[in-house]
Image: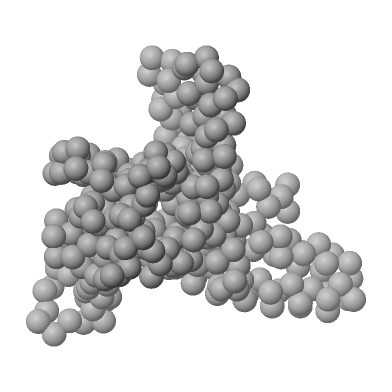
Amino acid sequence: MAGFGNALRLSSEFIAGVAVGAGLGWFIDRMAGTSPWGLIIFLLLGFGAGVLNVLRSAGQIAEFGAKPPAGGKGSDRK
Amino acid sequence: MANDPIHQFQISKWIPIEIGGLDFSFTNSSAFMVATVAAAGAFLFLTTSSRGLVPGRLQSISEMAYEFVASMLRDAAGSQGMRFFPFVFSLFMFVLVANLLGLFPYFFTVTSHIIVTFALALLVIGTVLVYGFWKHGLGFLKLFVPEGVPGVLIPLVVLIEVVSFLSRPISLSVRLFANMLAGHITLKVFAGFVTSLSALGAVGITGAVLPLIMTVAITGLEFLVAFLQAYVFAVLTCMYLNDALHPSH
């Protein structure tokens, strides 16, 4: 059942990224009247953020604001 | 309907209150929140009131909870993070006790409603934002610029990081809510099998043993999930607070 917990954790991270991207794009469209470009661009950014969230939560990429390993400029792999 | 697995999440108004067209009713959800706070507070107060130098069994539970959260916070956010200890400890105890109370039959699970967990997550992110900007000013924004990114990519990366940051309260709240909701529905569905199978006579009663075993096993698992989710919520809170304390690279 540890796999179930992992699945919930990673999927919630990914879905949250996409949902926030879409919501933000929709909100910007509504405010600025740029429909549908805000939604399109921010949905794509949301997918990026979702993947980033999943990688971070799986420990594949350093956390926000974490120092990259010494000498590892340009690669923030742990 | 006794076998409806969603019925347990229904909000019912106990004392209807309406102020200026807004609904402020005291519901079963509010009652169990009060019960959660009262139970957690009473437990901590009563078990530590004797202040034994050699802790008794209950006092050592309280002390373990304290040590557990304190070391979690110190590991994630350093000793500077200890100023947030009351906040993280209250959050941890609230989520833990709410999850555990929800495991009693006929009790309402406060944390199985997304609005409750979302409010908790907003509190965390709000604290991070307010403290981060108050402490570091605009330097807090460095959080969104990872080191070693080529200049051309910076606008794109910053946008993705901002969306990723904003998605944190969502994933924090969805995780807790989804775990509690899914667990309670599974439990109820298997328990429902027991009653509907045993209505079928002798064969059904023999068959009902299987979902009964499952129900017992899932109840055990739910205790684990209740602890685990409270722990995960607190750990992530510590990590986010760490960002507020040390945003620079």
- Residue B96, how many percent across, how many down? 39, 61
Residue at the image point whose x is 25% and y is 75% from the top = B64
Q: Is residue A62 above or below residue B27?
A: below
Figure quadrant of residue B186: bottom right
- Residue A30, how many percent across, how many down? 51, 18
- Residue B35, how many percent across, how many down? 37, 51
Q: Is residue B129 above or below residue B90?
A: above
Residue B215 visible, this orientation: yes
Give left or right: position of B244 versus B113. left
Quadrant of the drawing holding the C terminus of chain B: bottom left
Residue at the image point whose x is 59% and y is 71% from the top = A3
Residue at the image point whose x is 66% and y is 71% from the top = B215
Q: Is residue B61 above or below residue A6?
A: below
Query: Looking at this view, is B186 or B102 the one in front?
Result: B186
Give left or right: position of B62 versus A55. left
Figure quadrant of residue B216: bottom right
Q: Is residue B18 above or below residue B118?
A: above
